[in-house]
Image (cartoon, helix red, strand yellow):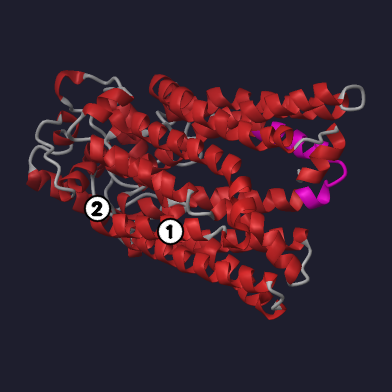
Amino acid sequence: MPQDTIQAEFGITEKTTFALTTSLLPVGGLLGSLILAPWLVNLLGRRGFLLASAPIFITAGGLMTASWWVKESSGTAAFGLLLAGRFLAGIGVGGGSVVAPMYVSEIAPVRFRGAFGSAVQFAVTAGILVVEGLGVVFKRDWVWLFIISTALGVAQAFFSLFIVRSPAFLAARGQRADAEDIVCGLHAIGPDDARAVVEGLSSSRSAGGDRSSPSLLALLRSPVYFFPLVLCMILQVAQQLSGINAVFFFSTHVFDAAGIDATTGSLVAAGVNIAATGLAVAIVDSAGRRLMLLLSTAGMMLAAGGLTACLVLLDAGDKSLATPAIVCVALYVLFFELGLGPIPWMIGAEFFPERPRATAMSAAAAVNYIFTFVVAQGFGAMQEALQNWSFLPFAGVLAVMLVYFLLVLPETKDRRPGEILKAMGIDISSEPDLLAEGDDQDDYDHHSDLDKALIMTDDFVPGRGAVNPGRTYTGSESAHSDPYFGDA
């Protein structure tokens, strides 16, 4: 819903009051990512979290739908329902933004882990494009937007019943046979090869059998996990301080200068968004995470500089720069989706073994929502102060991040957490979760190569079997005897 529609429908006149509609979602996201996600995902598993969080979205959609019916009698009460729904939706979104990339990373073959991780961001950008279109269709009858969001919560609960459990979660809790059976079905390989893959998925053999997830304080005190945790947090800070949300805000001004209405401009920007994310899905596993992030950061920095120049000259009366300004907006969005968009969400699953993974990814997501709130609250004041120069601070942040990534960011493609941390110069000898990835270095390297080799074979046909005569799954097998379906 656009700002003018909300203000007209609910009788809002104060900018600070309207700002609550945008800022309550990241506040809810902070709680969902930092508190709800690590608790539920370690208690119920990845699939269990998706089932348990679905009622949050259903309730949020129901509250926002109810605001339509209440607004005629009490605009204040209706606005309160809208805010409550936004806050609850934020809690669900915050938790989902942690669990979805974690789950996808754990079921994906190593060779395609980057593509699978970028596919999560692709789904998000596709959703944005669909919502932009629905906003045009239901501009007057906006209640249908909230009815659809309620229905999506119901769909999440239904389809979560049919997705597989995370083999990493199962293996870490001693259910190795079930984990291996699931990997057989997902990767279309035999039991011996599945056993080797499961070895690399989790820290299930950690000393002492402690399966509990460490606290955030424990990770911050850990000589092994402190630096990768900080790096994950900085990646999330870089994402929010890159200026991507400001670009979408300014794009309406740019498109207006080019004679393009705001609705068409928003749809064009969303279209570029999804096309760029599709490109990232296609190349992230061949190019690698490090190169993609460096390219993304450098490209956004240059686009920010170019957009600043175009905005200043446009304001001075040079209308010929409207088209170059649109190109800068498109490049800004494209470079964001190539790296800083998807990679901060997926790289945490590659840095950490199963046991500390949920805590680490939750903390990084919480930092993202904190800075989402900061940008949402602070950009208006910055825009008033700097006017057309508003993108210079973002360019400066991107320049600093580019240098930082050049100096400290390791490549994570086709590597296990232990390998990545060793490449960062971290001594992992004191961490049993990482030592549990392999009996020795030869075994460790062998399993990594094995998983890569398995998915490159010509006989890798998902759903039809493999060279190895192991168990594979078909759609006709009974759910009651299949470890795909269970409590976790």
Place of residue 97 in the rendered image (x, y in percent of width and height, measured from the top left): 49, 38
Name the residue type under label 1: Gly
**Which quadrant is home to the C terminus?**
top left
Q: Nearer the viewer, residue 266 or 310?
A: 310
Disc 2 marks which residue?
A: 408
Q: Confirm whether residue 176 shows in the render.
A: no
Q: Confirm whether residue 317 shows in the render.
A: yes
Place of residue 447 in the rendered image (x, y in percent of width and height, measured from the top left): 18, 47
Q: Which residues are magenta?
A: 135-152
Q: Is 240 drawn above or below residue 481 in the view shown?
A: below
What crowding class fits label 2: few (fewer than 14 Cα within 10 Å), some (14-19), or many (20 or more)? few
Q: Is 408 drawn above or below residue 483 in the view shown?
A: below
Q: Please tell me which of labels 1 and 2 falls first in the chain.
A: 1
- Residue at x 32%, y 26% (from the top left corner): 216
- Residue at x 75%, y 23% (from the top left corner): 80
Q: CA distance from mark 1 to mark 2?
A: 19 Å
Is residue 413 located in the magenta-colored stretch of the structure?
Answer: no
Place of residue 156 in the rendered image (x, y in percent of width and height, measured from the top left): 60, 33
The kind of secondary structure element at disc 2 is helix
Name the residue type under label 2: Val
